[in-house]
Image (tube, coloured by chain):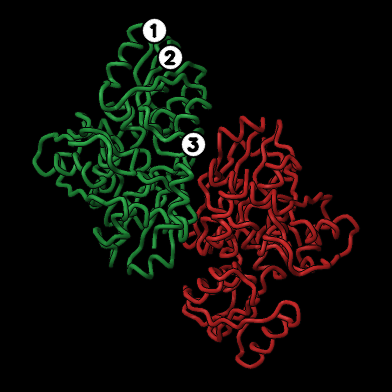
Chain colours: A red, B green
Amino acid sequence: MNMDAYEASVLAANRLKREAVHTPLVRSDLLDEQLGGRLLVKAENLQRTGSFKFRGAYNKIAGLDVATRNRGVVTYSSGNHGQAVALAARLFGISATVVMPRDAPGVKVENTRRYGAEIVLYDRASESREAIGEEICARTGATIVPPFDDPDVMAGQGTIALEIIEQMGDDLSSVDAILAGASGGGLMAGIAAVCEMRAPHVAIHPVEPENFDDLCRSLSCGERQRNEHSVGSICDALLGATPGVLPFSVLRRRAMHGYTVSDVEVRAAMLQAFRHLRLVLEPGGAAALAAVLSGKFPLYGRTVVVVASGGNVDETLFQQLFETTP
Amino acid sequence: MNMDAYEASVLAANRLKREAVHTPLVRSDLLDEQLGGRLLVKAENLQRTGSFKFRGAYNKIAGLDVATRNRGVVTYSSGNHGQAVALAARLFGISATVVMPRDAPGVKVENTRRYGAEIVLYDRASESREAIGEEICARTGATIVPPFDDPDVMAGQGTIALEIIEQMGDDLSSVDAILAGASGGGLMAGIAAVCEMRAPHVAIHPVEPENFDDLCRSLSCGERQRNEHSVGSICDALLGATPGVLPFSVLRRRAMHGYTVSDVEVRAAMLQAFRHLRLVLEPGGAAALAAVLSGKFPLYGRTVVVVASGGNVDETLFQQLFETTP
């Protein structure tokens, strides 16, 4: 299974080679000095469509047989996965339908439409996005591109770890940990599967918003837990109710400690990313960085890679950083 | 001379391999669709110290013999080159003095100090930064690291073109042009020397702020021209009085057309970089992008690489983008 997951990421990297941005490991000498360690930020906000989700979506669609693919794809998404599926579908010349929550950030809905997808809005409190998606597939013959609970999607996200390994080169042995935001766990699982084969010394830590720590709690008790709430964090990309079955089956095998961050810590991390990394991050994309900058995961004496997973942020929220954050 | 300049960039790339960020070519599918071409943004705002200047400064200091280097370095800079020299000096464990204009952005002065350099402020209207720098060198035995008029500095900046060539791979033949902001011309000349050897089909265009188009005018008439003003553009990094002797000797050999951009166009480009590229750019770092987004250099039907040369922007100026730009 593990070897399979690793090989699937290598295949995904090959498919993505000409399509995805090879995102840099960005660093700030001033932050490093202040924190007494070495922080490397994998800037997936610079990925096409503004988040890492393009990797998994493209890889999934690339892996469909041509007849199936030509009947189109459907997905459900708070925004970043939807944009990714919309663009990937367009690159293959097929149709895409994206089921999005009514409270998704306007910029994400608008951009998904501009990438050429048809949008279906739903209410997160009362409707099931999975059910809506399945109904569309039954009617049209389209294929679901799941946001995380799928081996090809996970393999696509795992290409981030392959790039980190390549970018570190001889210096890989110095990497102590990789931190990334977690919702369904697809990104974490893709990274974990690759690191298990190629960098088993690297600790992997998921980071979640306070009150949306389903993965942290699931890892503690060994069974998938659910969040009580569906709203109440600025990290709109990280509000999934429970870890995916497949990602959790990968993640639970490995002793792994998760961290949670508050909205205040996330805002502070977004401002530091602006100031010291010159990166525009959305709240969910800054969660892992917030775990380090808040000191919850101390950088001191360590080399840590943080995945900055997305940059699709509403402008009013971004402006508020300058007014309200110290 | 050309072969020498090219070889010097290859040597610089080797020196920088473990020290500089390998910055990505960032793209926006939405901008490309809107403009009908392919725009690739070389994100040098993600370089260490927040601008491409680290490349030239590090390469120059790396090339000094040890005894000379240990007597320290001195430079003059509106900010980005100063920060770059300060960090590069620290990496070699030597002292650095940076002569900066009193009206340089506060963030640049403060950061230069934090990288460990000693700061000497001067008045741009009444004092000569070169004279101040030479006086310090005469007194201390330190070496000047010129901001642009130096073969090793130019060779360091030329590594940007080597990276672009490597990143484009088989697709290099599709690149029509490279645009970059110009002040002393060191970046332009470094790029031009590399492209002459490795990508002679690529057109090279400097972009300057309105009223600070000394290089554009110099290229038109074949002799180095001076700007009338020393203040009056938000592009604080691009206000040099006249092209460097050495950069101009490289650039004049090649038929080359320059473009100028207004402050309004630069602000609009900074906002588009925030929205569509998730990059924080300073005004001078957005000048080349502004030439494309304003339509002065039309993207339609072309593949164009724009160098986003820096991201050290004052926060109040950045905030104003959201209030005043359409």
Q: Residue furthest top?
A: B139
Image quadrant holding the N terminus of chain B, namely: top left
Find residue B140 and name its label. Answer: 1
Helix, strand or loop at label 1? It is helix
Q: Nearer the viewer, residue A49 or A267?
A: A267
Residue A175: quadrant of the picture: top right
Kindly report which numbered mark, 1 or 3, lies closer to the viewer in this rendering. 1
- For the residue marked with disc 2, what is the amino acid? Gly
Q: Which residue is mark 2?
A: B72
**Mark with earlier residue (3, 2):** 3
- For the residue marked with disc 1, what is the amino acid? Thr
Q: Residue furthest bottom?
A: A139
- For the residue marked with disc 3, what is the amino acid? Arg
Label 3 lies in what chain? B
Q: CA distance from mark 1 to mark 2?
A: 8 Å
Residue visible at 51% across and 53% down in the picture:
A22
Say if residue A91 shows up in the picture.
yes
**Mark with earlier residue (1, 3):** 3
Kindly report which numbered mark, 1 or 2, lies closer to the viewer in this rendering. 1
Up-down relation of residue B133 to residue A7 (above or below): above
Q: Nearer the viewer, residue B174 or A11?
A: B174
Label 1 lies in what chain? B
Q: CA distance from mark 1 to mark 3?
A: 28 Å
